[in-house]
Amino acid sequence: MKLNILKSDNKFKGLVLIPIIEFDEVIELPDGFSQIEVSKNLFSGKKDTQFIIEDKINERIYVLLGLGKTPEYHVVKTIFRRLTAKQESLIGEDILLVFSGGVETDLIEAAVSGLILGTYRLGHFKNLETEPKNWEDLTLSIISSHKNALEIAEKGIKIANAQLQAFKLVDLPPNKATPEYLAEWAKKTGKHFGISVKAFDRKKSEKEGLKAFLAVAQGSQKEPQFIIMKYRHKEATKHFGLVGKGVTFDTGGLNIKIAGMVHMKCDMGGAACVLAAMQLIADLQLPVNVTAVVPCVENVIDSQSFVPSDVIGSHSGKTIEIIDTDAEGRLILADGLSYIIKNHQPDTVIDFATLTGSAVGTFGYECAALFSNDNELSQKLQGGGMAINEKVWPLPLWDAYKSEMDSDIADIKNFHGKPIAGAITAAKFLQAFTENHPSWAHIDIAGTAFGDSEFAKTKHATAFGVHLLIKLLENK
């Protein structure tokens, strides 16, 4: 999508989008558009409403988009996403987006980002009768009095482009989005955006002592990949470490899942979040250093699968009693956390994982569960999430829960076997592999990474966490 900033709408032909904030009296149109007559009885700017006017003489279609009285970031984003997703027939080769005076930065960013997100189509493997629209040929022009309108719009496009990558990585079927596919994606993206990337295969992972990671992988013929990405900036004063759970498909192993397995391609939602966030961090050239570790495996069943009551090793040196093979995500995260902390010494470590049904039971699909030993980090994540509707909310890491993970035969067990406090005990398990790091956060995105919306008939990716990480790094 090409981007232009215009001073006036002279000679423009095509689709004109005018976001309108709801007023009690008279609708306020941008300067230069007083020729548009709209009765308040027909359109008042109420949230999620539209008013369409065709101007055949000037070869334009005006779409007035109601934002409500106090537009929120995610509301504006959804309104504009809805347009490109559901009203593609209105769109030719040119769109003009016109903002009134005094418009806020977030509104411009959300609107542009939403337009890009609406171009996503879930039918990656459909045989279509007609060629899909080439959105790259579209020109988006903007009229705004904001002095940084171009920079803001470009940022909105970059955010959306990264989120589109997260959509696709999660939505692709597991026979396509394999561990090796994710490693190749990381290498290709790294080359384009200037990120150093390497990936350990099974043999190299054995040399590195990634025993818990390999235990999960041993039942699959698909080669596991332990991906390491490094982004460095010359003005950085802080180093962040990111870890993303990359189980490309989860049968549950020998503790096979009895429901919902069809959706388990989403069990690499944490990996997709971290991979896409790395693209966005580099694309925005944020002045931070970031190292990401993304352990990618497939958890399936064959004669080589690990079994309940196995005792396995780990990168940290701790031994782990396997109680449930469906508690596999925490095993690969344990090695990911230990590896990144021991080998790269980040100032702050954050992991993202579709980890527990317990997090869904607590927060539903509205919010992710947050665990952290750093109160300042926790508050920044909460504040950033509320601003963009990627909400996270804290649950305790009290040591009273630590004994739930005690094992008689090993240093720790991977599941406490009780139908209570599942998200908390999983977090306590992970904490045991953080090497007493003073600034760590675990975000359980089981309920937020994949779900239902108006944009598809089936459950699909949300890209939850990508923008949240950027908000945090911008407010470091």
Image (tube, helix red, strand yellow):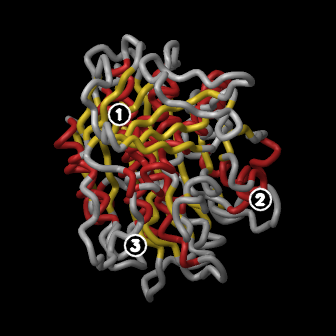
- Which of discs 3 and 2 lies nearer the camera? The answer is 3
Residue at the location (37% across, 11% down)? 147
Q: CA distance from mark 1 to mark 3?
A: 36 Å
Q: Is residue 234 left or right of residue 86?
A: left
Residue type of the residue flagged with mark 1: Leu
Q: Is residue 200 left or right of residue 219?
A: left
Q: Which residue is mark 2?
A: 361
Dot 1 or dot 3: first in sequence order is 1
Residue type of the residue flagged with mark 3: Pro
Dot 3 or dot 2: first in sequence order is 3
Q: Nearer the viewer, residue 116 or 62?
A: 62
Determine the secondary structure under disc 3.
loop
Q: Position of residue 454 (x, y in %)?
A: 58, 59
* Mark 1: few/some/many CA within 10 Å (<14, 14-19, 20+): many
Query: Does the image show residue 317?
Result: no
- Which of discs 2 and 1 lies nearer the camera? The answer is 1
Query: Does the image show residue 1?
Result: yes
Instruction: Report if the CB atoms under discs 2 and 1 are less than 8 Å apart.
Output: no
* Mark 2: few/some/many CA within 10 Å (<14, 14-19, 20+): few
Q: CA distance from mark 3 to mark 2?
A: 26 Å
Residue type of the residue flagged with mark 2: Gly
- Residue 462: mark in rendering: none
Residue at the location (50% across, 58% down)? 461
Dot 2 or dot 1: first in sequence order is 1
- Residue 173: mark in rendering: 3
Q: Which residue is mark 1?
A: 96
Instruction: Report if the CB atoms under discs 3 and 2 are less than 8 Å apart.
Output: no
- Which of discs 1 and 3 lies nearer the camera? The answer is 1
Q: Position of residue 95 (x, y in %)?
A: 33, 39
In the picture shown, does residue 322 fall above or below 155?
below
In the picture shown, does residue 156 fall above or below 245?
above
